[in-house]
Image: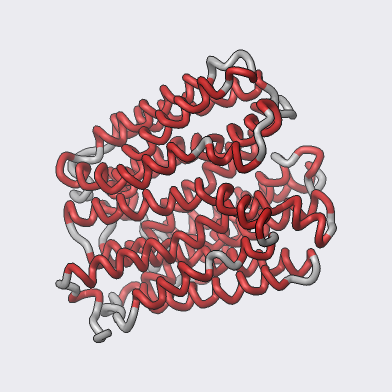
Amino acid sequence: MSTESIDRVVDDRLRRRLLAAAILASFVSFLDGSITNIALPAIERDLGGGVSTQQWVVDGYLLTLSALILLAGAVSDAAGRLRVLRIAIVAFVVTSALCALAPTAGVLIGARVLQGVAGAFLVPGSLSLIIAVFEGPAQSKAIGTWTGWTTVSGLLGPVVGGGLVDGVGWRSVFLIGLLPAAAAMLLLGRTSDGARPADRQRIDVASAALAALGLAGVTVGLIELGAGAGAALPPAVAGVLLAAGGVALGGFLLRNARTRRPLVPPSLFAARNFAWGNLSTFFVYGALGLVMLVPTLFLQRVVGLPATGAALVSLPSTLLLILLSGRFGALAGRLGARRFMTAGPIVAAGGALTASFVRDPATALWFVIPSTVLIGLGLSMTVAPLTAAVLGAVPPESSGIGSAVNNAVARVAGLITVATAGWILGGVVTLEGYVRSSIVTAVLLAVGGLVALAGIRGRASDGA
């Protein structure tokens, strides 16, 4: 493969190759965030540690992933997209192998914490790579393809994980990501980074520390407060961490507004589509947090389906996202993101309301499956135009931090709704709790659509 700078990409075949590399690099991060859940009982049987171990196998990854994602975006812009992306892929491979080989629960949790660090650098780097090599409607379509496949990775995780755990063992769950990671490295080839803007070469360390500490405190606080009786920390300690995280984030905002080299340039939020798009992201991805958690629990614990069977119910959504996300992204590039960002969440809200009519577990699938189809269709209409609208409003030299902000908003929104799921469900998964969760999901989606209607302007690529 010849060496070529991403600032001078003119070959469509190279663009497609770099798009595939970006998708695969992000795919492993999103997949690992969802596939591990299905392996938790087997991990506990093998390594012991009880509920606390199971929680922190999941939460250790989410903690560093959420805490470092803003820093990762800034580093990607400052040090070079491809350089950071390559290092992150190698680090993810190494930490995944450590997880698979872990002899004790403590080693596994430590490896998961390190794996989250690598995962935090994968997503901003891959998205900023797409922004660098695609423009206009082609950029919207590329983002649509990326969002479709990365969303699919989260939905496929339980299905793939169930088969691996039953057929090979839980350690294979951490090795499955090595194949797409290796493929991403091969596809990147010898392509080099473009020139770095001089004013983005340095990072404000104090801002980065405040952001990391703030996101870490909020993440741990929300996780522990939402864990109920299975929490590893007392509620008072979790509350203190949540409050301290909020204070640190407040300090970050103050410093970020005053420093000469802000971690997150305030000018990003002066772009209407970036500000309103992130607000819509908060509501839509908050709803998505419930969509990915509650129906699977309901189908297993109330309806009585096995884990793999419950995961297969999400297959229609997965197929719709694969088939339609790129197409809706392309349409948004030509027609504007606003109509899709409005209609998509409303369609998905209709799907969530459909599930709220369940009255008997014996007939639940007659409502849950149509609900899944409508939610999948609505998300297919939404996620690509939303991401394209947000990132289309970001200057190319700030694409890493722009994508990091959007991903941080999405992850914090999901953490909040998952943390409050216990209250919504009433402390235990029941039919009545599932109905309540479906209504809350529908409201969040509808608000996300109305926010987009009120705030998004122009085409996805206009940066309005």
Horizontal relation, residue 209 to residue 235: left or right: left
Compare residues 75 and 308 and report the one nearer the observer.
308
- Which of the 4 image quarters holds residue 436? top right
317 shown above or below 7: above
Q: Residue at x 66, y 38 (%)?
A: 306
392 up-or-down from 416: above or below: below
Q: Is residue 93 left or right of residue 453?
A: right
Q: Residue 262 location in percent, x, y?
A: 41, 64
Q: Is residue 149 left or right of residue 57?
A: left
The residue positioned 33% from the left and 48% from the top of the image is: 387
Return the x and y of residue 92 as percentages of the image width and height.
Answer: 55, 71
In the rendered image, which quarter is residue 186 located in? bottom left
Decide: is 215 above or below 436: below
> Based on the displayed image, in which of its 4 quarters is residue 100 positioned?
bottom right
Labels in figure, total: 0
Q: How is the image coloured?
A: secondary structure
Q: Is residue 207 visible?
A: no
Residue at x 84% of width, y 57% of height: 49
Image quarter where the N terminus lies is bottom left
Residue occupying the far bottom of the picture: 2
Q: Classify residue 366 as left or right of residue 10.
A: right
Q: What residue is shown at x 53% (from left), y 15% (from top)?
A: 357
Image height of 240 relative to 60, above or below = above
Residue 414, can we see it? yes
Residue 343 position within the rendered picture, expressed as x and y whole percent measured from the top left: 30, 29
> Foreground: 181 or 123?
181
Q: Nearer the viewer, residue 334 or 260?
A: 334
User: Is residue 167 or residue 451 the one in the foreground?
Assistant: 167
List x then y, in percent, for residue 202: 41, 76
